[in-house]
Image (spheres, coloured by chain):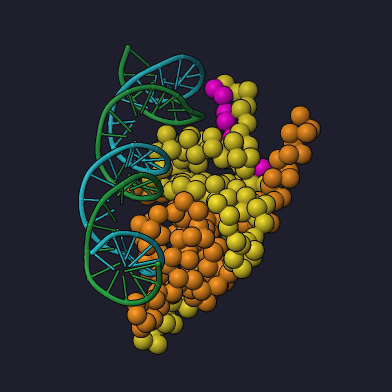
Chain colours: A orange, B yellow, C cyan, D green
DNA sequence: TATAGCAATATACTAAAGTATAGCGGTATC
DNA sequence: GATACCGCTATACTTTAGTATATTGCTATA
């Protein structure tokens, strides 16, 4: 099946960009990832502290999401050799730099809300 | 139930920021939103064009997601009075400014991949 | 000895998201 | 008259995500 490239296909963006965006989306995906990342932006926390700081999250979800975030390289888990064991979670460097993305979201979100309310007034 | 505020709770970020981030997340949420937005970044397109430019999407999903994007104010749908009718989809101004967020994602994603591969080398 | 905190895990379930497939009403083409 | 394109919608189904609830092994405190 021979296919002639259309202008649109030629304009297609590089694969590396697509992969990069997907990587970022993966990190935010799901109901609880952003609240967890947001909470960790304020600093290292223990499991129970996180659980208390994120309203309505269950320990199952917290544990599951933290594992995924660790796998994705944005959260670091540390087991301290105390009695009983203490476990802390903190953002990796990569995790902290997500702040730039979040900031872009905040800027966009606020502009967006504003332009939407203006439109409603105009109608 | 009286509760004493912890340092962490005092540090909590403003509600408007949280809402703004959620607004942005809503727009990207789901498997197909980003591919659709990305495709529309190259310009106005018709339903069938979009369908062809996004591999594996079904018309049901495309239609569903376009409706949501329209509701969220990032896509504008125009019905042209031709025979048969032509329907075009394009990004609103708000939709175009999502580019900034996507760019931040690209920057983060590429850095992240790099730092991860470096870690692997170091180990 | 009973109770509570810590850091989870196990099991069972519901809800939401996504897929597969068929079809509609219109027009244009073979 | 059959087929194909356009812009969808309908129905049924599977997969994934999230919830609810109970339990574990350990220690410290009442």
Q: Is residue B24 left or right of residue D14?
A: right
A10 inside magenta stretch: no
Q: Position of residue D21 (x, y in %)?
A: 31, 47
Of the 4 image quadrants, the one containing the C terminus of chain B is bottom left
The stretch in magenta equals B84-92
Q: Is residue A69 above or below residue C17?
A: below
Decide if residue A45 is in sight here. Answer: yes
Q: Main secondary structure of the magenta part?
A: strand
Q: Is residue A15 above or below residue B117?
A: above
Residue positioned 58% across, 69% down in the render: A42
Foreground residue among D4 and B108: B108
Q: Position of residue A73 (x, y in %)?
A: 43, 72
Residue positioned 50% across, 57% down in the render: A54
Q: Position of residue A13 (x, y in %)?
A: 53, 59
Residue positioned 42% across, 67% down in the render: A47
Q: Position of residue B93 (x, y in %)?
A: 69, 46
Foreground residue among B72 and A80: A80
């Amino acid at each position: 099946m021979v296919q002639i490239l259309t202008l649109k296909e030629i304009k297609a963006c590089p694969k590396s960009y697509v992969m990069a965006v997907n990587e970022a989306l993966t990190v935010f995906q799901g109901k609880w990832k952003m609240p967890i990342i947001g909470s960790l932006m304020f600093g290292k926390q223990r499991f129970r502290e996180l659980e208390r700081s994120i309203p309505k999250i269950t320990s199952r979800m917290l544990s599951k999401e933290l594992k995924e975030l660790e796998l994705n390289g944005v959260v670091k888990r540390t087991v301290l050799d105390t009695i009983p064991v203490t476990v802390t979670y903190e953002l990796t460097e990569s995790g902290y730099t997500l702040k730039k993305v979040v900031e872009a979201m905040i800027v966009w979100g606020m502009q967006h809300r504003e332009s939407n309310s203006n439109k409603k007034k105009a109608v």
